[in-house]
Image (cartoon, rainbow, N blue to C red):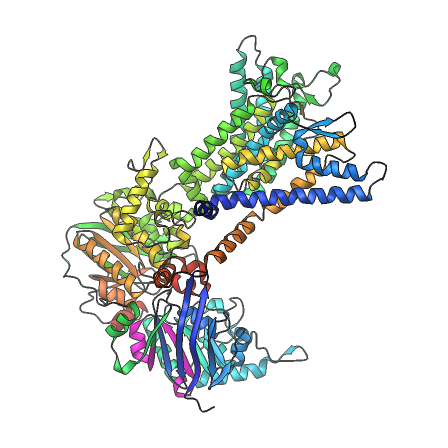
Amino acid sequence: MNSEYIIEMLNIRKEFPGIVANDDITLQLRKGEIHALLGENGAGKSTLMSVLFGLYQPEAGVIKKNGQVVKINNPNDATALEIGMVHQHFKLVDVFTVMDNIILGAEDSKLGFLQRKKARKKVEELSKRYNLNVDLDAKVEDISVGMQQRTEILKMLYRDNEILIFDEPTAVLTPQEIDELMEIMRGFAKEGKSILFITHKLNEIMAVADRVSVLRKGKYIGTVETKNTTKQELSNMMVGRPVQLEVQKAPSNPGEVVLSVQGLTVPSKLHKNNAVKGVSFQVRKGEIVCIAGIDGNGQSELVYGLTGLEKASGGKVTLCGKDISKASIRGRANAGMSHIPEDRHKHGLVLDFTLEQNLVLQDFQDERFQKLGFINSGAIREYSEKLIEQFDVRSGQGAVTAARSMSGGNQQKAIIARELDRNKELIIAVQPTRGLDVGAIEYIHGQLVAQRDAGKAVLLVSLELDEVMNLSDRILVMYEGEIVGELDPKKTTVQELGLYMAGAKRDNEQEV
Amino acid sequence: MKNTLLDMYRKDGTKKVLASLISIFAGLVLGSIIAVIVGLTGNPQSFSTQSIFDGIRLIFGGLFSTGRGAQGQLTFGFNPSNWGNMFFRAVPIMMTGLSVAVAFKTGLFNIGTPGQFLMGTMGTLYVALSIPTTVVPAWLVWLLAFLAGTLLGAIWGAIPGLLKATRGVNEVLACIMTNWIAGNLVYMFFKANTQLQCPPETGKTGYIMVTAENGVATSKMGLDKLLPGSQVNGGIIIAIVIAIGVYVLMNKTTLGYQLKACGANRHAARYAGIKDKRNIVLSMAIAGALAASGASLYFLSGNAEFAWTKIYQSLPEEGFNGIPVALLATNHPIGVIFSSIFMSMLNINGQMLQNLTSYNKHLSDIIIAAIVYLSSFSLLIKMLLSKKKKEKAAPAPEPAKEEAKAAQAEETAAPEETAGDSADAEEG
């Protein structure tokens, strides 16, 4: 019982047919520490956590709690060992209240009747003690993402969990919410709870973690104390080579206007109001303009309106001097528009098609690829192999790989290859690095900057503050369907940007 | 040699064919078991051990049956009439099978084949019997009749397509409705057009005249010489050509690419500027035309009679049989050629069973049902086949290559094989 570590995972090995997801991995969690688990996509972080949570059985290795070997066969065993987890995608019942969600699965009952009062008292105490503000009687579908996360945290606390696992908890939060979460996590650590924090964001690790364990390609690379390391060192450990964290780019040199938007209004599918309310802005040659904002403030609809995926109800869009307000989707594309879509599975790829079929999704009717309606498969193969080579798209069987079987990063690379090779004047990139790891992000950012330097106009929509600050030449902040401010990334701070994004601050006059 | 065999086995196509063959074999075995049970529990005067054995032999090889010999034993050999009739009966289900397969490839479930088949019947028979061959050459009448039927089917198929594209109505619901509308419409049409009905003096009440009455019939293309004593005609050749055409359309043309893109991911198709609504209507129209052309080919054979009086009660089975044909072929147009001929063979086997033993020919319907049931599991069987392959392939990768392989697998197979990691890979 006198072990230094509350949880130890020693020499864990987990295989799946054909691959070793975890190869001799050791993770030791001290009592009362915040321990970050860092790794690229597919490094084996989630597999390791699934082993700890009893979802997978390891082929080799042991798990110890307080120095005693334990066997975790299913999540119930994990709960019994006081291990709790906040999943990346929340496991909440939307139509239940917060309270009902918290007690779900751990209901206290007497003769089959729920003991709500007792439970409620406990939850209220917990929420007060850890400063977790939630409206217990609100339905989950009505509350913000941040509150949903707090609900998940309360769920763990209600079950008296001592070991708390957070799986990429900050992906969905605003900067202010992230700060609050960090504060909450520190509070837990002070109370003696132990925290495992899975992430690939280095800033957060530096801010909150005591120690970091790094995984790469299923292998354990090492554990370091946060105070003895740097972001650069961590990212090198994670990727296995020196990584450029900051985007390297020369000052922009904007030329003539490529895209001009005047009073664009797009109706919402979710509510009766307009999602985009009379937005006006311009994008010029040789600059990267970034639309920043918290998810759901009309950015997606703005892009739909620009690309023609949805009909705008008002306003004028001019591309390269041509009025495209009424043009079809293909008409707009031909007028000089490339579109890297937000949702690569919904819009970007036909997952059941092969890689090469996806690479010609936009241009299959081009004379290069067809003659009198008959597909020239030889030309498509040649073209695909060129793109695969040029953009380093990795896949199992090359051009004929099913898009579905490719990793997220390579799927995104395929889309980027397709869109950039079309060589259009305007590139609309919506969250182009969403869910990707440092190496892939570095690559994609480099490509976008190269396009800018080649004289293309780039309209970037991003939720990632780092990306907004690093990549853009101008920032337009969107809040509730309007552009509330234009910022210069060199002169502004993340805090100021956060205020604009939260609607707490806005430029008086909107002129862009 | 062993490697090429293994490569072939690893191919997706091979696995599909294997999966279908396994379901066929299992279906035939089930039919045999039923034959044994029926034989053992049936009237001992009709069933002896020998007759049970005969029944099983016919279930598997009825096509080759040439009747019974002098001692009453079953004889087998090449039976041209059986072969010819098999091809003849394969034609309509080949076309409805293609119809279902094309729709399926484009993400639509065309259960409207009976209605489309009926509309094709109506258009074809009306044109073939109404234009006098004394004025217009018979071959031209044939062509017009074929086109009329096909066109009507295309229109009929386009209706559910339009409803889905513009109003979001589920095509299955719309198809079921249009089926019954077609049933009643065609019934009323033939009731009103008494000149098309078989005259009472022929004693064939309730039938429409065969097109041969007007001198319109599909050319035999020499097949009758090859397979004498059967109903075979050039329709089978036309149907096979159409099937190959459909394969080319779906796999080698930009139109097929568009249709499939819409079916596989309508949003991505729209994103790429493909007109998704137009393509849904077009898919259904093509499917309708195919189903209807099955009717056209069947009735233009010259010797098929159309019983019109009951169609408002029961839709033509050729329509629905397209679904199992397509399923068994895993929606591959070339596969449909074989699966339709196979289904037709089972039909012939059933016929021989009824003729030569005390078994009922509907035993073959049970076999078809079992095969269809199993073939809807063909995906599962395919998966099992893949799994077995992986287990065999997995052990003992060379140590030196292991790391590279693991790295590559991380890159490529991670979303598929490590469920936990895939969530990680998709959104961060």
* Left or right: where A131 falls relative to A456: right
> Which residue lies at the image location 67% right of the left edge and 77% below the top edge?
A112
Nearer to the camera, A255 or B42: B42
Quarter of the image with the N terminus of chain B in it: top left
- At 75% from the left edge and 32% from the top edge, which residue is drawn? B354
Q: Which quarter of the rendered picture does the C terminus of chain B lie within?
A: bottom left
Tell me the quarter of the picture where residue B72 sits. top right
Q: Residue furthest top?
A: B134
Q: Nearer the viewer, residue B209 or A211?
A: A211
Which residue is painted at 59% across and 32% down in the image?
B341
Q: Position of residue A296 (x, y in %)?
A: 37, 62
Residue B209: in magenta span: no
Q: Is residue A208 magenta?
A: yes
The x, y position of residue B271, in whole percent, is 36, 47
Q: Taking B198 as reference, is A347 left or right?
A: left
Q: Looking at the rendering, which quadrant does residue A226 occupy? A: bottom left
In-image side of B234 versus A64 (left or right): right
Is residue B299 at least partly visible in the picture? yes
Q: Is residue A241 above or below residue B42?
A: below
Vertical order, B283 against A444 (above or below): above
| Magenta range | A188-212
Q: How many marks?
A: 0
